[in-house]
Image: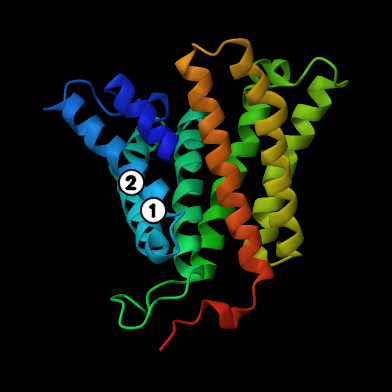
Amino acid sequence: MAALGGLGIGFRDFAFAWQLVPKGIPEHDALAIVCGAILVAGGLALLVPRTARLSALALAAVLLLFVLAVRVPHAVAQPLVEGNWYGLSETLTFVAGSWTMFSMVPARHGQALARLGSVRAGQILFALALPALGLAHFFYMDQTAPLIPSWLPFHVPLAYFTGAAHIAAGLAILFGVLPRLAATLEAIMVSLFTLLVWVPVVIAAPGNAYDWTELLVSMAIAGAAWAVAESFHTPASTFAPRR
């Protein structure tokens, strides 16, 4: 999140992950910098125990606003374009991860909104986001298969398999069929995507801002997946607010 925000500030744009924001809106560049600063501050604040809960809530709110104001209208206007649902679901994984972290971190004594937070809500949001990520592998096979490293065999079957794995993980988490295992395997798979696909791509062309965005988005999805996976490992009592 922090690096995505920095990318937006550096380019005075909403980074490639947020390109649906119209260029013609008033104070476009200034708004892009403000949004980037929010992501930077929110991402870094997650690393500080005292501010982690509040920053996770702020990130969830900002990202959800982006989903509702930009992603949803675009998908509704062109419902037959799978890429629109992919983009919506991609951002929804960020919302789900942020909300899950907010719900998992115990509230400090006297903290406002101490009782707000539902881990299950984050898990459901994450589950609902995964099928569109998987379907993109099927709809855009000509773009997905070539991303698989050349030293791995069976590029097309692997692309189909990983797409189906996204869908299966989402359904398993949503309906409670071995959800802990499904979330953990999803987190491992996306982490491997990050390491095996996007890290080499960025190393090969470090000046390409689009590739950096893809790397950072993949990292963010992996982080959200690990947060959701951890939410199934942690006893429910851990989530209870401290009195």
In the rendered picture of this protein, how many numbered marks are placed on residues? 2
Where residue 222 appears, x then y in whole percent?
Answer: 61, 44
Extreme-right residue of the structure: 153
Residue type highlighted by circle 1: Ala
Which element is circle 2 on? helix
> What amino acid type should be assigned to the residue bearing mark 2?
Ala
Give the quarter of the image for residue 16. Answer: top left
The residue identified by callout 2 is: 41
Circle 1 packing at 10 Å, graded few (<14), some (14-19), many (20+), is some
As helix, strand or loop, the secondary structure at mark 1 comes to: helix
Report x, y in % for residue 167: 68, 45
Q: Residue 54, position in %: x, y?
A: 35, 63
Q: Residue at x 51, y 23 (%)?
A: 212
Query: Which residue is pictured at 31% across the width and 20% down the height?
Result: 11
Using the rendered image of the protein, determine whether residue 20 is visible from the camera's viewpoint: no
Quadrant assignment for the C terminus: bottom left
In front of the other: 40 or 162 = 40
Seen as rendered, the residue at the extreme left is: 26
Residue 146 drawn above or below residue 168: above
Q: Is residue 173 above or below residue 85?
A: below
| Marks 1/2: CA–CA distance | 6 Å
Label disc, if present, on residue 31 of the rendered structure: none
Q: Position of residue 113 (x, y in %)?
A: 31, 75
Q: Are marks 1 and 2 in contact (CB under 8 Å)?
A: yes
In this image, 83 relative to 38: left or right?
right
Q: Residue 189 versus residue 129: which sits nearer the camera?
A: 189
Name the disc covering residue 45, or none: 1
